[in-house]
Image (cartoon, rainbow, N blue to C red):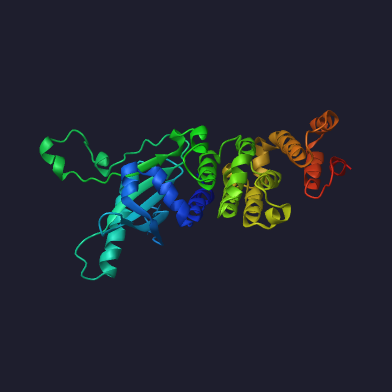
Amino acid sequence: MTATLLQAHDAAVRSFFEDHRLAAEIFTFILPREVAEAIDMGVLRERKDRYTDSDLRWSGTDVSFDARMREIPVALYMMLDHQSSVDRMMPLRLWQNIGRLWYTEVSVHEGRRTLPFVLPMVLTNAPDLWTAPTDIGMLIEGAGRWPAAFADLMPRLPYVVSDLRAMTNEALASANLSPSSRLFLLALRNGKHPDIVAMFDSWRWLLDATGDEPGGLRVKRIVVAYLALVAPDMTQETMMHIGQTAGFEPEWIRHSFAWKQLQQGLAKGREEGLSEGLARGREEGREEERPEQTRRILVALLGTRFGPVPPNVQRKVNKAKLDELEAWTCRMVTAASVEDVFR
């Protein structure tokens, strides 16, 4: 996966968790019930820890929060890493980040004689189920075959995994979460699905509900920006459709940061060609796919703006060449009627 796509995944997660109410809700969703109930989620305070290891090219935790226990007067840190691919060395990464956090605490609070508890979590939307070891002891050579006398000497660092690939869209859509959290997790799970545009259209009810709650507009912006950067074969026409489906005006969409990022991405190609250029993408066969994709987008936009598409209009679109389809799609931005589109 390219660095640009990794940044898109991680930036979306970090942006979403800036809303501490939503962060608390996701933590409660991820953690075992007894663990979540023991933590006072109402006093979360975000940390700005970013740990890096230039030699191993490891980036640190995506989100980190201070929290407190309900029954005992101690603090704990909640550390969440987002993973868009399965990383077998995840326990070692967490071990390293927790160690750095502890060293920071000791250096900042001189004379400290205890270490804070750190609760590590991984939220993954990898295309495959999470199969990496969930405890650092599982990485030790010969794990499971050592004599019983060594059991207490083996290192341990278990972590909680929330694997979106192990959940169905139906389960996420009906989860006991706010509309904003459900929408975000669905987008995170399905962002690279080839049918994401059709899926997004089917989430209109969830988009409306998200827009009605506090902070919902911001979440919809995060989701639209995320899909603009990670969805397969994303075009400006497709982003315009997604943005309008989410309830945004064309003017806002064209001036959004995601639109500008998409323009740059299209100039370089999508995931296979983010560094190759759109021309290279066409050479690799995308030219043959674009007319049909543009037809689908145009018909979807026509239906959204003007209602059911008449048969004669559908036939006209089916026979059109790519340059005509692109011209008509561009006119969708300002057209007041179907006739204006095909003038």
**338 relative to 69 in the view: left or right:** right
Percent from the top left, x then y, of residue 187?
55, 42
Can the viewer see residue 273?
no
Q: How many marks?
A: 0
Percent from the top left, x then y, of residue 151?
15, 40
Q: Quadrant of the C terminus?
A: top right
Can the viewer see residue 321?
yes
Nearer to us in this view, 312 or 21:
21
Percent from the top left, x then y, of residue 245?
67, 44
Q: Report the residue that reaches farthest toward the front.
A: 71
The residue drawn where x is 70% and y is 55% is 254
The residue drawn where x is 75% and y is 37% is 303
Q: Is residue 50 above or below residue 246?
A: below
Q: Quadrant of residue 207?
A: top right
Nearer to us in this view, 316 or 53:
316
Q: Quadrant of residue 289?
A: top right
Nearer to us in this view, 9 or 26:
26
The residue drawn where x is 35% and y is 45% is 90
Q: Report the residue that reaches farthest toward the bottom.
A: 110
**259 relative to 151 in the view: left or right:** right
Percent from the top left, x then y, of residue 105?
28, 64
**90 relative to 174 in the view: left or right:** left
The residue drawn where x is 33% and y is 49% is 120
Q: Report the residue that reaches farthest toward the right.
A: 343
